[in-house]
Amino acid sequence: MYSSTITEHEDNKNRKSAQETENGRNSILNQPAMHMPAEQPLIWRNIIVIAILHVTAIYLFATRYREAKFWTWMWSIAYAHLSGFGITAGLHRLWAHRSYRAKLQLRVLLIFLYCMAGQVRILYDVLIAI
């Protein structure tokens, strides 16, 4: 009786020829999986910065929201949506899933929008998503 690892190994041997692409190269499915630790370490620098950011935002919203002009609120809403667009359309759909192609100008814009969201390690995030 096979254990699950032996079964997977035997199945991979049988499927090897089916995983070859038209140009004769093996597909990405045949490559070994990237090992990630089961428990991710806490990144205290990020935790502290995000906590300070949220506490400051709550304090300023509670004490000074009447001082903000209409266009400040519009800028905040637009900034939040554009930075979210950089994460969803840029990192997630374009680079992680490769669900569409984009010209260089759009890629640069999406990287800029992604960085607006406070994310600066796009290559690391794409490699984790793969």
Image (cartoon, grey):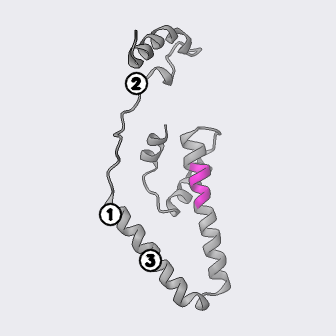
How far apart are the two marked residues, 1 and 2, measured between alpha carbons?
32 Å
Q: Nearer the viewer, residue 88 or 58?
A: 58
**Amino acid marked by disc 2:** Pro
Q: Which residue is mark 2?
A: 32
Q: Residue at x 64, y 87 (%)?
A: 69
First along the sequence among labels 3 and 2 = 2
**Amino acid marked by disc 1:** Arg
Part of the protein shown in magenta: 84-90
**Amino acid marked by disc 3:** Val
Q: Which residue is mark 3?
A: 55
Residue 75, percent across and down?
63, 75
Residue 14, percent across and down?
49, 8
Q: Which residue in the rendered view is the most extreme toward the front?
A: 1
First along the sequence among labels 1 and 2 = 2
Q: Around disc 3, counting alpha carbons within 10 Å, would you say few (fewer than 14), some (14 to 19), or many (20 or more)? A: few
Residue 10 vs 85, above or below: the answer is above
First along the sequence among labels 1 and 3 = 1
Q: Residue at x 44, y 56 (%)?
A: 120
Q: Secondary structure at mark 1?
A: helix
